[in-house]
Image (spheres, rainbow, N blue to C red):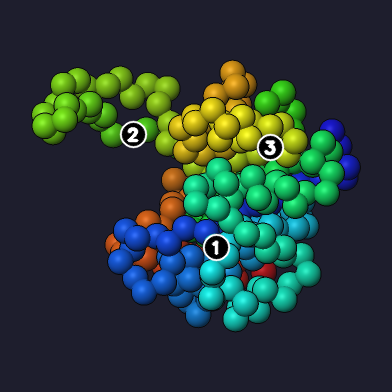
Amino acid sequence: MPENTLSIVAIVPAAGVGSRMQADRPKQYLTLQNKTILEHTVHQLLAHPLIHRVIIALSEQDPYFDSLPLSNDPRVTRVCGGKERADSVLSGLNAVVEPHNTFALVHDAARPNVSHQDISRLIDTGVKHPVGAILASPVKDTMKRSNMSGEITQTVDREKLWHALTPQLFNAEQLKMALEHGLKTGAVITDEASAMENIDRFPSIVAGRSDNIKVTSPEDLELMTFYLSKRDFQETTDV
């Protein structure tokens, strides 16, 4: 499909509370460099030339979003998220006008440092693949399996093991069907790729940058501040 005919909508599930962060608000509303993590993430998506709309799935009781300038951006649509990630993504997909002709690029709200180069390579691969594609990083450390007592039972071969990242890109209609099926059957769905795998459809992997980290704990904030400062500096020197 030629790039000028692509219809890509980014969906950002952001209804979680982020309890591991131990903060007074969901992690997507913590501030880095005078902007919330959510703002950094959405602005990075909208700055990509192939993404013209972002759908954000928020908790129905979310008291923070309406106070952000982002809430007045005509390119941003707010929908009501659900208890689980799959519910929130499905809510976003229900807001897609023409799902058959649209690719859904699902991205974590707490991954503000995704690069445009990775997004471009993901789109290029995903639209050509019959199922879709995800960003992932290869496992670099020795992997261990343990028993319930915490004792090592096996060293796992890390060859061909990957850390799943986001964005993940799929035809919106196909992803909607996969998520609906998974929720109906009680399948374990931890990301969009697992929903597709559950119906025996297997996406491609696109190797992504290791600095596309997800902010999940307090120590991640300092690291993300460094990454964003480095990116801002690079963008300034490239002008």
**Residue at position x 55%, y 43% in the image:** 86
Secondary element at image label 3: helix
User: Is tag 3's residue or tag 1's residue first in the polypeptide sequence?
Assistant: 1
According to the image, label 3 marks what residue?
176
Q: Residue 140 carries which label?
A: 2
Res 182 → quadrant: top right
According to the image, label 1 marks what residue?
59
Q: Give the number of the mark in front: 3 or 2.
A: 3
Position of residue 236 measured from the top left corner of the image (x, y, whole percent): 60, 71
**Residue at position x 16%, y 30% in the image:** 148
Q: Distance between the residues labelled 2 and 1?
A: 36 Å
Query: Quick one: quadrant of the C terminus?
Result: bottom right
Of residues 56 and 46, the one nearer the viewer is 56
Amino acid bearing label 3: Lys
User: Is tag 2's residue or tag 1's residue first in the polypeptide sequence?
Assistant: 1
Q: Residue 108 carries which label?
A: none
- Dot 1: within a 10 Å radius of its alpha carbon, few (fewer than 14), some, or many (20 or more) residues? many
